[in-house]
Image (cartoon, helix red, strand yellow):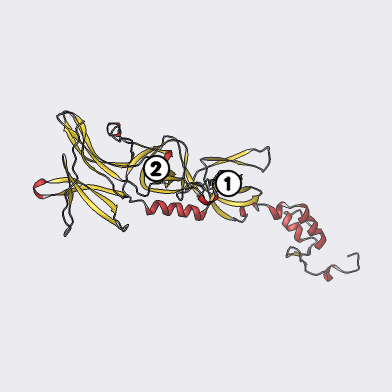
Amino acid sequence: MAAGRSRSQLPSEVPIAHYGVPVRASQSSSLRPRASSTLVRSLPNRAAFLVLALTPGLVAGGCGRGRKVLEINYVSAPQVALRDQVAAVFNKVGVVRSGDRVEVLDHQRRFVKVRTSSGGEGWMEQRYLVSQKTYGELEKLGEDHRGDPVQATGMARNDTNLHLEAARDSEHLYQLSSGDKVSLLERATTEKATPFVLPASAPANKGQPKRAMEDWWLVRDSHGRTGWVLAHMVDIDVPLEIAQYAEGQRIQAFFVLDSVADGDKKVPEYLVLLNQPKDGMPCDFDQIRVFTWNLRRHRYETAYRERNLDGVLPVLVGQESFEKEGTLPTFTLRLKDDEANVLARKYKLNTPIVRRVLAPGEAGEKPMVRKHRR
């Protein structure tokens, strides 16, 4: 008005290019108090810009809820506290646990800001997370081995991780606690990660010594989670009454074949797989023994033993009908021949006798039946 233009000459809309919000000139000389958004529309460009600049809540309010998710991760530690800031002094704002799904919102040095499934947000160390790809691979590992027959049961000796592969540096998500029960499914052997160094006095032409090996077990815990653990971190639950007959060998697996009544108790009879007492053996087992119960002496005896085997897990146990003999316990071994072909060999137990069950067309052979008195 001071510039000499009449009210009717004022433009009806004054655009604010920075925000893309049109500002409409007032059509009345008397303005009543209105909401802030109405007041902004009634101001010239510069005045409206100042109002918006001084009230950032109008623009920035609620931006945290719409923050872009960078990736999906999963917590790999038993329990991790979420902090409100990346600093030596912080407040605990939440807790996440092994297997929890989190959304990654920001990265700062070795820390990431995450949002939990309940909507809570906080900072945690990146090393306690695994990627969605790793989570999917671990889920697939469990699914692929869901129907595998259990070869033995055991107990975790200490807290130990369930790895994706039989290697110390492979990814892991879940952790066994000391004393947790597990089912053993499959064995593997790999080289130890620690390199060997030749002594300074060693002749150069002898080369590097052979690397040490270590055994691993693929296990399934009571929650159905599957992964690889170092074999020496699991104690196999071998019954004490047969463990005493190991004769210095390592019991790799055991199975209950049958049970007999001795007075008022039922006594199980076992198939036991053994190997040399060291890691890195090329076969899963090199001998088997069948322990049956002597009702007259009230003790276990070795009903059958076979050595020098190149055995491969898993071993299958079951029952089968044999005409006049009736239904008998059976077990099937998987053994490598001289050409490394894996062949199945079935046996039946008609206490205390163990015999081969020949496949159609298979030539007979004299079974190695050895009875041992103790």
Extreme left residue here?
324
Asked whether 119 or 81 is in front, the reply is 81
What is the secondary structure assignment of the residue under circle 2? strand
251 in relation to 345, above or below: above
**Residue 304 at x, y percent in the picture:** 21, 41
- Mark 2: amino acid: Asp
Q: Residues within 10 Å of mark 2 (few under 14, many from 20)?
A: many
Kindly identify the residue that appears in the image at 43 percent across and 35 percent down: 157
Q: Which residue is mark 2?
A: 221
Q: Residues within 10 Å of mark 1 (few under 14, many from 20)?
A: few
The quadrant in which residue 2 appears is: bottom right
207 in relation to 177, above or below: below
Q: Which residue is mark 1?
A: 127
Kindly identify the residue that appears in the image at 80 percent across and 56 percent down: 50
**Residue 119 at x, y percent in the picture:** 56, 47
- Mark 1: amino acid: Arg
Kindly identify the residue that appears in the image at 42 percent across and 39 percent down: 232
In this rendering, position of residue 355 left or right of residue 35: left
**Residue 372 at x, y percent in the picture:** 20, 35
Q: Quadrant of the N terminus?
A: bottom right
Asked whether 61 or 51 is in front, the reply is 61
Query: Which numbered disc, 2 or 1, marks the residue that appears first in the sequence?
Result: 1
| Residue 224 in sight from this viewpoint | no
Asked whether 3 or 258 is in front, the reply is 258
CB-based contact (under 8 Å), mark 2 and mark 1: no
Asked whether 8 or 350 is in front, the reply is 350
The quadrant in which residue 180 appears is: top left
| Residue 162 in sight from this viewpoint | yes
**Residue 103 at x, y percent in the picture:** 56, 51
Total residue callouts: 2
In this rendering, position of residue 352 left or right of residue 145: left
Per the rendering, the mark at residue 374 is: none
